[in-house]
Image (cartoon, rainbow, N blue to C red):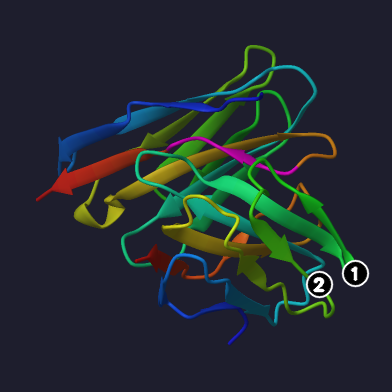
Amino acid sequence: ILNVEQSPQSLHVQEGDSTNFTCSFPSSNFYALHWYRWETAKSPEALFVMTLNGDEKKKGRISATLNTKEGYSYLYIKGSQPEDSATYLCAFNQAGTALIFGKGTTLSVSS
Amino acid sequence: DGGITQSPKYLFRKEGQNVTLSCEQNLNHDAMYWYRQDPGQGLRLIYYSQIVNDFQKGDIAEGYSVSREKKESFPLTVTSAQKNPTAFYLCASSIPVNTGELFFGEGSRLTVL
């Protein structure tokens, strides 16, 4: 059974801190890696979809990197704000398969 | 507005009853999915459909059934055979299949009394 691991499970930071999360996935037959943000009482929303080894994507203060050979992706948040508080989900799939999600990292940012 | 609509938002069911969760999308997406979330768990795939009149089982399909008679609709029936149906259910759609980002509904919370 394929597994996606995310760490840490949760963390609490102060406003202005920078932080990062890790997503680990099987490196064989890699197809795509997704990051989603899930705020309380809302729907999960896509942040990034990455398909190439070495991909780096950025959206405002949030960025992500991908290493398909070793099977990991990092999500970085620079200068965390209270509105960044959410659960961040990582999902991976191999060719021809549906996405497999990790359990998520829950971020809480205090002002 | 384009999006995915799930209903009902909250649903209570007695043991032994079947219930159907609705999922409608107006994004013109080919692929639709049903996920289940339990506390401390990631989203787990129940069923997905890549095209009308076709669907595939996910990792936890037992006790569930789906249909895909129209492109915009993908209802999920939780049958009495599902041993632990109390959970949060999310519907999603995407284009293209497997590589496109997922667009999610707001979810349905099912509680079995």
Residue at the spot x=53%, y=70% of the render? B105
Circle 1 packing at 10 Å, graded few (<14), some (14-19), many (20+), is few
Q: Position of residue A14 (x, y in %)?
A: 13, 40
Q: Amino acid at mark 1?
A: Asn
Q: Quadrant of the N terminus of chain B?
A: bottom right
Mark toward the start of the polypeptide (2 vs 1): 1
| Numbered circle sitting on residue B53 | 1
Q: From which residue to which does the magenta span run?
A: A98-103
Q: Position of residue A49 (x, y in %)?
A: 64, 44
Q: Magenta: predominant secondary structure element? A: loop
Report the chain holding disc 1.
B
Residue at the spot x=23%, y=33% of the render? A11
Between B73 and A105, the one nearer to me in the picture: B73
Q: Quadrant of the C terminus of chain B?
A: bottom left
Q: Is residue A29 left or right of residue A103?
A: right
Q: Is residue A75 left or right of residue A13?
A: right
Q: Which residue is mark 2?
A: B68
